[in-house]
């Protein structure tokens, strides 16, 4: 009976020690996971994170720079064309040119070009205004296409980083013969960082590309309407 009690006590002690060890391991794993900072996670992605970081920097720079440029170009008071109409009805072409010079916008430059061509056939004036409009649109769309390229490249770069990580894992397994879940999962999750980073950069570039394109399209629509209004003013006079 005494030996039986000793066996039970020993088994209970071993079970308790095993449970405590498992709990300690779980706590250590949780602590390690909690201590993993964002910088550490990025560094685990390897060298592929360098071009992804550069692409993210370029994307953010283009988005901010183009947004400010387009906003400045769109700032044109509604009274501008009314002022141009009033001055041209009076025959004050010099005043109309001065009004255009006071408004540094694509629309003002288009109208100023048309005013400088007054005296030529209306068809030539219209062509001049359209040519200036094309140049201004090209300036507004500058570098926006780069965002579209980045939106396609960044996710592929991230996927390449993950594939390289998987290749390294299986190469290590083939050379060492050590095949374990901890080894595979530990190496794989660090390499998945590149895929996540690539997708994030791609999403930023994709959203920025379409957002800026919509802003440019709206501004082009306003410029076209104003150009038509300007030609109507010339025909009325």
Image (tube, rainbow, N blue to C red):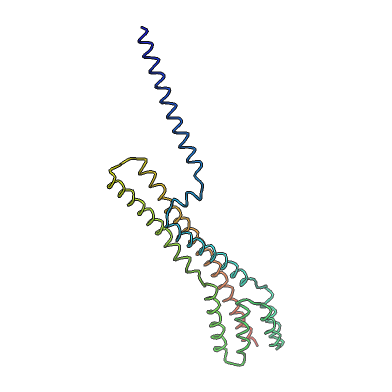
Foreground pick, 61 / 101: 61
Q: Position of residue 23 (x, y in %)?
A: 45, 30
Foreground pick, 169 / 209: 169
Q: At 61% from the left edge and 79% from the top edge, which residue is drawn?
A: 229
Q: At 47% from the left edge and 35% from the top edge, which residue is drawn?
A: 28
Q: Is residue 69 above or below residue 187?
A: below
Q: At 56% from the left edge and 69% from the top edge, which residue is drawn?
A: 218
Foreground pick, 163 / 155: 163
Q: Position of residue 207 (x, y in %)?
A: 50, 60
The quadrant the C terminus occupies is bottom right
Q: Is residue 158 left or right of residue 135?
A: left
* Total count of labels: 0
Q: Is residue 18 left or right of residue 126?
A: left
Identify the residue at the far front of this view.
176
Q: At 42% from the left edge and 30% from the top edge, which residue is drawn?
A: 22
The quadrant the N terminus occupies is top left
Q: Is residue 33 above or below residue 74?
A: above
Determine which quarter of the picture holds residue 219.
bottom right
Q: Position of residue 89 (x, y in %)?
A: 70, 86
Determine which quarter of the picture holds residue 129.
bottom right
Q: Is residue 97 above or below residue 213?
A: below
């Amino acid at each position: 009976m005494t030996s039986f009690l000793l066996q039970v006590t020993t088994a209970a002690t071993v079970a308790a020690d095993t449970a405590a060890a498992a709990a300690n391991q779980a706590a250590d794993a949780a602590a390690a996971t909690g201590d993993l900072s964002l910088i550490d996670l990025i560094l685990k992605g390897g060298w592929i994170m360098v071009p992804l970081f550069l692409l993210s920097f370029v994307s953010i720079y283009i988005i901010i720079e183009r947004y400010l440029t387009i906003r400045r170009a769109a700032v044109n008071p509604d009274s501008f064309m009314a002022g141009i109409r009033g001055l041209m009805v009076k025959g004050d072409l010099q005043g109309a040119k001065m009004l255009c010079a006071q408004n540094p916008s694509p629309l003002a430059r288009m109208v100023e070009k048309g005013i400088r061509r007054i005296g030529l056939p209306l068809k030539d004036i219209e062509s001049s205004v359209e040519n200036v409009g094309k140049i201004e649109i090209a300036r507004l769309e500058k570098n926006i296409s780069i965002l579209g390229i980045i939106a396609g490249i960044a996710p592929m770069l991230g996927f390449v980083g993950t594939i390289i990580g998987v290749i390294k894992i299986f190469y290590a397994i083939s050379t060492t013969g050590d095949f374990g879940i901890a080894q595979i999962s530990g190496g794989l999750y660090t390499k998945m960082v590149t895929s996540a980073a690539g997708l994030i950069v791609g999403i930023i570039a994709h959203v920025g590309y379409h957002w800026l394109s919509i802003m440019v399209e709206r501004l082009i629509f306003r410029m076209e309407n104003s150009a038509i209004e300007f030609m109507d003013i010339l025909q009325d006079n």
